[in-house]
Image (cartoon, rainbow, N blue to C red):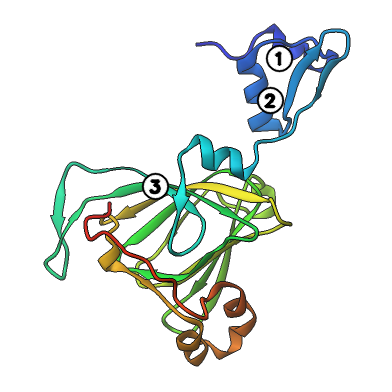
Amino acid sequence: MSYINTDFFSFSNGNTKNADTLFLIDRFFGYTCRQEDTSKGLVPMTKPTASFWIHELLLQPHAEGGYFRETGHSPELIVTEDRRERYLYSNILFLLTADNPSHFHRLKSDEAWYFHEGSTLTIHLLHPDGRYEAVKMGRHPEKGELFQFTVPKGVIFGSSIEGSSGDYALVSCMVSPGFDYRDFELLPYDALIKVYPDYGSILEKLAYKKLPEASFSKDHV
């Protein structure tokens, strides 16, 4: 399949009609555009909203915040250190918005994040030794933003979006060994502030004052 053709080089004149070329221009050069009228050339197009992705990807609310959908797991099962069976890995799509962040929680497995779309996302990590670390993910590596990052098991973490209401970030997450709600722990504000007293401002934003009531499936991928 050939994506680079004469349409690519006619972009600056507003003459391109090749959908694959427009896709590449959008992804690699930051343009979002469409052909409205050949006499006018390319005009700006509104980028997809969080609601668009939630609807198109069939995402559902997550207990920690944000929206997700399970997308699969390994066929293999493994036995963990505590003698529990888990999938070798599991995957989800995950979307966060500026007003619906991921609240502080902890997993017994490593979780790899892969950035796809949207605004800059910050993963806030509270390490067992008392350190706080902020890792930014996004489309701007020149600003230190990452496309991939792995949260180590046992680290408390939450995630937020930079921007105003309506801004979002779409990512994929892979957990290995595979995710199970029995390995998932939400941490409330009262418990965290005792251990991390120097980080009250971020705890105010990303720690639940009261944990949400939720029914978790023990067989969740």
Q: Is residue 174 above or below residue 43?
A: below
Q: Say whether disc 2 or disc 1 marks the residue closer to the N-terminus.
A: 1
- Left of 103 or right of it: where is 34? right
Name the amino acid type tagged 1: Phe
* Figure quadrant of residue 161: bottom right
Q: Secondary structure at mark 1?
A: helix
Q: Quadrant of residue 187?
A: bottom left
In the figure, 125 relative to 216: above or below?
Answer: below
Amino acid marked by disc 2: Ile
Q: Residue at x 35, y 61 (%)?
A: 110
Give the distance between the C-alpha atoms of the residues marked 3 and 1, in whole angstroms: 34 Å
Residue at the spot x=68%, y=25% of the render? 25
Q: Residue at x 74, y 30 (%)?
A: 31
Number of residues whose C-alpha sits closer than 10 Å to that of mark 2, classed few (under 14), some (14–19) or many (20 or more): some
Task: Identify the residue under disc 2.
Answer: 25
The residue wearing badge 1 is 8
Mark 3–mark 2 Cα distance, whole angstroms, equals 27 Å
Give whichever of discs 3 and 2 has the lower sequence position.
Answer: 2
Residue 112, labelled with which disc? Answer: none
Q: Which SS class for mark 2?
A: helix
- Could you tell me how far apart the alpha carbons at marks 2 and 1 are, in whole angstroms? 8 Å
- Across and down, in percent, residue 3 comes to 58, 14
> Which disc, if any, is residue 92?
3
Task: Using the image, determine if residue 140 lies above or below residue 190.
Answer: above
* Residues at circles 2 and 1 in contact by the CB criterion of under 8 Å: yes
> The residue tagged with tag 3: helix, strand or loop?
strand
Q: Position of residue 15 (x, y in %)?
A: 79, 9
Q: Is residue 1 left or right of residue 20?
A: left
* Mark 1 burial class by Cα count in 10 Å: few <14, some 14-19, many 20+: some
Three-letter amino acid code at the position of disc 3 = Ile
The x, y position of residue 142, in whole percent, is: 69, 49
